[in-house]
Amino acid sequence: MRRIMVVLLLLAGPAHGQDWAPLTGPEIEALLTDATVSYGTARQRFFPSGRTLYNAGRDSWGYWSVRGDQYCSNWPPADRWDCYDMTASGEAVRFIDANGGITEGTRSR
């Protein structure tokens, strides 16, 4: 369940009228490094060191990386990495899991 918490707070309803562009690995890294993504009341900070801090009322530390053209995360004590395709439209970002589930957030620096 903790791995889902990483960036998975499904927002009510998709963004309408936006063009979503798929992101490459280098684009994902540039977009997330040293940035914060807000998901409603939760936030996630992506540090250049590969650490990530998720907070939805309490801090949860994990790791993030880019593998190929996907964002990947690991939340100890689990040793498994979960990977997601990403798309962006302006400052809005989407994380898309292997089953097509979408988590949407807004990026800021």
Image: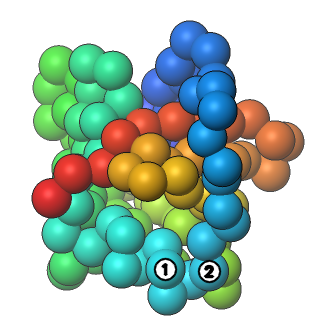
Identify the secondary structure beneath mark 1. Answer: helix
Disc 2 marks which amino acid? Thr
Q: Residue 65, position in %: x, y?
A: 44, 75
Find residue 93 and report its horizontal and vertical position in percent: 49, 49
Q: Quadrant of the C terminus?
A: bottom left
Q: Quadrant of residue 39?
A: top left
- For image coordinates 26% across by 18% down, the residue present is 41
Evaluate if marks 2 and 1 touch, with contact meaning CB atoms under 8 Å apart: yes
Residue at which label 1 appears = 27
Three-letter amino acid code at the position of disc 1: Glu
* Residue 108 screen position, x and y as percent: 21, 51
Q: What residue is shown at x 57% (from left), y 46% (from top)?
A: 94
Residue shown at 36%/79% (left/top)? 30
Classify residue 27 as left or right of residue 108.
right
Q: Is residue 39 left or right of residue 104?
A: left
User: Mark 2 — residue?
Assistant: 24
Label 2 neighbour load within 10 Å: few <14, some 14-19, many 20+: some
SS at mark 2? loop
Q: For the residues marked 2 and 1, what is the alpha-carbon distance in whole angstroms?
A: 5 Å
